[in-house]
Image: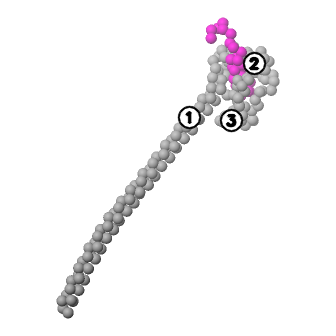
Amino acid sequence: MSAGTEIPRDTLERWALAVHAWLCDAEGVGVVAEAMVATKMDRRAVMAGIQLLRDEALWVIEVDERGMISASAVTEPMFTKPEYRVRCMHRSTSIDGRQRIVSCNACGDLLDPFDVLNEIANAGQLRWIVGSEMSRREAEQRAAQLAKVKREEDNAKARVRTARDRATELEARVRQLQAEVEGLERLAGAREAGAA
């Protein structure tokens, strides 16, 4: 945007909410450069956010020529924070569609909507990757199990064929032996008949 271009109200409000959140964290004292880093905005955006907070009479803010900020809230801060300062991972968030802000349900911090969306997308992608990796491993395990079962089936079929072939050979040998026994019995019967 050029210097003469008017900034849309919703952009100003987003900047002001980011500065407001930083002021709450900093307890109203800090430096413009710190605000720029914390809010991930440039100096112009930080200063525009400060100005809107002044104009809306939410904060009394003084910025000196060195960039030192001292502020006090006119009204109670939008989001009260717990006294302890445990690093919040912002796992649960709320979306205010009217004001177009995203906040953490646990600590009340204002969050960058794009960062939240990106986090959700990355978490979903990670779940998909992990799920697909688990599915791939499960498919490999099932394929290995199936191959094992097929090998066992082939081995069982081979054992049945071998046993059937052996049984056929034994049956043939039994018939051959029966024929020999019958031949010997006839020969023995003929000798007895000839000796008598």
**Is residue 73 visible in the rendered structure shown here?**
yes
State the image coordinates of residue 157 (x, y, percent, origin top left): 38, 59
Q: Is residue 22 left or right of residue 75?
A: left
| Residue 183 magenta | no
Checking the image for residue 17, the label placed there is: none
Q: Magenta residues?
A: 1-30
Which of the marked residues, 1 or 3, is nearer the chain's N terminus?
Answer: 3
Seen at 51% across and 43% down, the residue is: 135
State the image coordinates of residue 153 (x, y, percent, origin top left): 41, 57
Q: Residue furthest top?
A: 4
Checking the image for residue 53, the label placed there is: 2
Nearer the observer: mark 1 or 3; the answer is 1
Checking the image for residue 125, the label placed there is: 1
Q: In the image, what residue type sits under mark 3?
A: Ser
Mark 3 surroundings: few (<14), some (14-19) or many (≥20) residues within 10 A: few
Q: 136 or 26, which is in the foreground?
A: 136
Classify mark 1: helix, strand or loop.
helix
Nearer the observer: mark 2 or 3; the answer is 3
Evaluate if marks 1 and 2 touch, with contact meaning CB atoms under 8 Å apart.
no
Mark 3 lies on residue: 92
Q: Is residue 34 left or right of residue 54?
A: left
Nearer the observer: mark 1 or 2; the answer is 1
Dividing the picture into quadrants, the one containing residue 149 is bottom left
Q: In the image, what residue type sits under mark 2?
A: Leu
Q: Residue furthest right?
A: 75
